[in-house]
Image: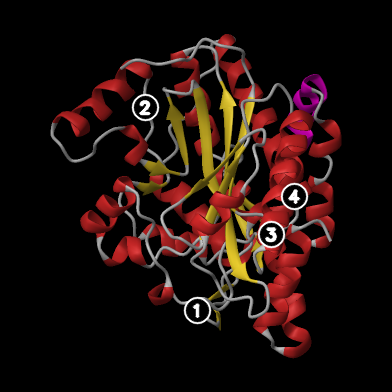
Amino acid sequence: MEHRFGGRAFTLGIEEELMIVDAESLELSNAIETLLAALPETEGEVKPELMESVCEIATDPCDSVAAAGAQLRALRSTVCEVADSRGLAIGSAGTHPFAMWEDQRIVARPRYRDLIAALKFVARQEIIFGVHVHVGIDDPDKAIHVANGLRLYSALLLALSANSPFWRADATGLMSSRTPIFRAFPRVGVPPFYRDFEDYSDRIGLMVESGVIEDYTYLWYDVRPHPRLGTVEVRVMDAQTRVEHTLALTALVQAMAKEFAEDFDAGKPVRDVAYEMLDENKWIAARHGLDGELVDLPRRERVPAKTLVRRVIDQVRCHAQDLGSEAEFDVIEDILAKGTGGARQLVVYEANHDLREVMGEIVEKTAGG
């Protein structure tokens, strides 16, 4: 398999899937083409996703979290301004609190039309929104090692990012409703463990050659190598309402990637932890967010999620310092102290049991309010 692992290590790219809503009703609006037609030229990219009510923004490859953050803030600002001029607004969270998938239109793009034809209801009901972080890795076998390492901590990243407690006008009892909704897709969730890049290439090659997938981008695992970009991509996290939370999670992912890259250089292997344990940890994170107890896999003990987060950030903080992202990294403490975006949604909802009020705050905070 061709790849581009070999460029600068630990470069970053961030993708955010955003909601397009009517500015008055706050309902999802099938308006991506209206938005795209009015956009000025900007650094980074604004593009459609599966549904016409979704807008994806993506930074260019950046050398630091600060540089990626500047681009991401500018992209958010641009799409918010254009939306406002068209009677629309932009919101960021893992799900829209009261939207119905039956009201959403599919974009007129061949990839997405084909996806609906292949997956039917499974794809049609996917009104969910995530944030994806790409980290550049300079060697193909090292990329597999880093992906195997990050796979062990996907539950922790989900607990920190949980931001979807509502679905179809219902309080689901989950902190990340997005997680079980997306689980209906094939080739999602906890990724397989690969021995090295040759093993990865052989296994994905079989899937492509047999015709079950077109290429590796049809694997939507929580963590995946992205050979065409030369990155490892982390996809487990809910979309974040506050941009500083997106950047904090980005800084954490980058620092963790550096930890595993250094382990590879030192000849330290990644353990192939049993799938069922990783999947159980992820379920607990989706159900309870930071209020649950996760299994600290190296110590084989169940601890409060916040305790596990603090253990990990203490371990990798030195890498954030080396990478110049300590300021963004330290915002993890704000999430631990004040709660995730999902916890904030529940606080707003408890005041009046008004989901439009919840969506109103999401729109306000997405724009930087």
Tell me which segment is drawn in magenta: 314-323
Give the SS element for disc 3: helix
What residue would you read off at disc 3?
Answer: 290
According to the picture, the residue beneath numbered tag 1 turns out to be: 168
Secondary structure, mark 1, is loop
Give the spatial CA distance, label 1 vs label 3: 23 Å
CA gap, disc 2 to disc 4? 40 Å
x then y, percent, for residue 133: 59, 37
The residue singled out by tag 4 in the image is: 77
Query: Which quadrant is the C terminus positioned in?
Result: bottom right
Q: Are marks 4 and 1 in contact (CB under 8 Å)?
A: no
- Left-right relation of 139 to 243: left
* Model colouring: secondary structure
Badge 2 is on which residue? 194
For the residue marked with disc 4, what is the amino acid?
Answer: Ser
- Residue 308 appearing in the image: no
Circle nearer the N terminus (2, 1): 1
Quick one: label 1 or label 3, which is nearer the N terminus? 1
Question: Which amino acid does the dot numbered 2 rest on?
Answer: Tyr
Tell which of 294 and 365 is nearer to you.
Answer: 365
**Distance between mark 4 and mark 1 Cα atoms:** 28 Å
